Amino acid sequence: MATVLSTSIDVCFNPQYSDTKKHSLFSKPSSLRQSRTRKLTISCSSTKQPKTLEEEPITKTPSLSEQLKPLSATTLRQEQQTHVLSKPKSVWVNPTRPKRSVLSLQRQKRSAYSYNPQIKDLRAFAQKLNSSGFAEKSEFLALLDEIPHPPSRDNALLVLNSLREWQKTHIFFDWVKAKNLFPMETIFYNVTMKSLRFGRQFQLIEAMAFEMVEDGVELDNITYSTIITCAKRCNLYDKAIEWFERMYKTGLMPDEVTYSAILDVYSKSGKVEEVLSLYERAVATGWKPDAIAFSVLGKMFGEAGDYDGIRYVLQEMKSMDVKPNVVVYNTLLEAMGRAGKPGLARSLFNEMLESGLAPNEKTLTALVKIYGKARWAKDALQLWEEMKAKKWPMDFILYNTLLNMCADIGLEEEAERLFDDMKESGGCKPDSFSYTAMLNIYGSGGKAEKGMKLFEEMLEAGVQVNVMGCTCLVQCLGKAKRIDDLVSVFETSVQRGVKPDDRLCGCLLSVMALCESSEDAEKVMGCLRRANEKLVAFVKLVIDEKTEFETVKEEFKLVINGTQVEARRPFCNCLIDICRGKKQQERAHELLYLGTLFGLYPGLHNKTVKEWSLDVRSLSVGAAETALEEWMRTLANIVRRREDLPEVFLAQTGTGTHRFSQGLANSFASHLEQLAAPFKPSDRAGVFVATKEDLVSWLESKFPPLVASQA
């Protein structure tokens, strides 16, 4: 009887015993690249029962947060989670056996075109077909009968290559095939498929491929490459992989173009293991990847934010003496941005310039986004000046990216100069996104007059108003207490086609919290009613003192479930602010409790042995004050029960990096002063500190009256 011994053996590849190029392995393993153990089965004669020798797995005791499933995961609708990349298996190359080829190192040879003396007439005919319009297929077929010369193989191929629209190409192909004047060769299918690929007509391409198989027409590398790349463009990654595997089953080796395409497909579908496995096996068989293949790898590592992987791509290119082109630099710059490496992105950009390559619009847009995200205003503005001085290409996307960067950082004057520069440019007049960025800047800075003037200019220019621009201006007018202008802007925007979303509804809620008169609040409520009637009904229910807590809880869950995830916490913040504005403190505390219960305020409280902290950085002013009061009540009860306390207590409000951002610090400090709480500003901005001794003394002397009302 055979006994199966199963053990884990680490199989390592030593490059010195193989002619495999050293660049086929990572010089520094990426976080995505870790080897795994493999099982080896050994059989021998024995009468004993089979035994399995395996290393006991090391189990890790789950943390408390892992054991307790958040209530929000079972009660609130969740957004689809992004796919987590799996760790790939290591690729082992046996140095004692010949390397099996996985691709053809020879590019697919294209058919040579012979000179056709009828070329002039046929091209004129193709031009006539391209310029013709037809409502019915029969009309176009009637035109085809006017072909000046018989549709021989060469004549038909010339016309087929000259047609631009995929519909006409497909009709002409079927017309030629129906005449049955000559055998339909692979090249006719390939030309037609490429035209269909431009139209993203994968179903038609796949049907033609099956037709080729049925009729015995050979599918070559160009055919498979066209099918795979079309599936990729249509986001049909499973289909692309299916045809790639079908190609191998037929015994046809993919060429470099097809191989690079399937690398991209695996990368976009999150199959990191397959990408690295395909890449290393191809390199081991002598393939020298081109810039496109390295672009795929760079993008894949960038999506994962894996800086080690990005650095690996650069090292591989250098070791293979592959010069990056503009596309590769663009991809790597975007990857650097996702990995949060603005300094390295700047160095990479300088390296690109030193190599003699000129950046295009995508290069500059990627770099501006990186600088804006890192809030490197100085570098971004220097880049803009360099663009103008060197007359680098500028397009809508680049201009708008610069404007958005100015809006994020709060560079009003610089944005105005850039906006004027757009107006003076020949082909990049400000569009809806440009105006929205400016409205955002004026809204953040409280420049209501400038915002209204820009809005009127936008309407006169016939530029489409979008919901983001409307939201920015409504917020600005609300802070300026210009409620009538706010109502006018809202109604005009809705008439122009703006559909209010949750962000705009949250903005109207925040304005309601700022309204000092019931008349103004009712005007804002009227706007909100047109946007979200259920939300208005809930607001009325909340501010009604007779409403029971259980009713509020059930309705709150319904409203939050019907709200986009990113707008849920702002909604709760605004509702708390509205209640505090109406002196309904206890209802504000109830809403804070519900927000915490349903997972809207993760990380609000943090505890260590040495310090306890309250983090209100994601809260509004009213919600932060409510959270502080709730924390003090809890601490007062702990003191009353004489439980252990740490030596230090922190309250974190954060400090906005935006130039116009006022943050919570000032309002929070004022509230601490009103309560006479012993929290003092620390050396870190937006952090308030209290010692155990001072806080306990204050709680015992000042806070009991507040707690007594809860007893």
Image (cartoon, grey):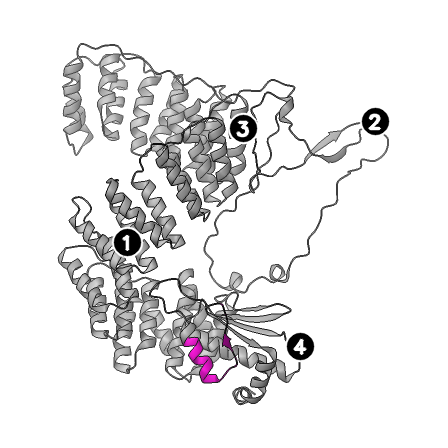
Q: Nearer the viewer, mark 3 or mark 2?
A: 3
User: Does label 4 or label 1 sit earlier along the sequence?
Assistant: 1
Q: Nearer the viewer, residue 591 or 384?
A: 384
Query: Residue 296, how many percent across, how many down?
Result: 44, 35
Q: Look at the image and tell me whether residue 550 can be seen.
A: no
Q: Is residue 641 magenta?
A: no
Residue 635 position by quadrant? bottom right
Mark 2 is on which residue type? Ser
Q: Which residue is mark 3?
A: 23
User: Magenta stretch: residue 669 in it?
Assistant: yes
Q: Residues within 10 Å of mark 1 (few under 14, many from 20)?
A: many
**Which tag, 3 or 2, sits closer to the chain's start?**
3
Q: Amino acid at mark 4?
A: Asp
**Residue occupied by mark 4:** 644
Q: Is residue 302 visible?
A: yes
Q: Which residue is mark 2?
A: 45
Using a 10 Å C-alpha cutoff, classify the residue at mark 2 as few (fewer than 14 neighbours), some (14 to 19) or many (20 or more): few
Of the residues shown, which amino acid type is indicated by label 3? His
Q: Position of residue 536 (x, y in %)?
A: 33, 73
- Which mark's residue is nearer the viewer, 3 or 4? 3
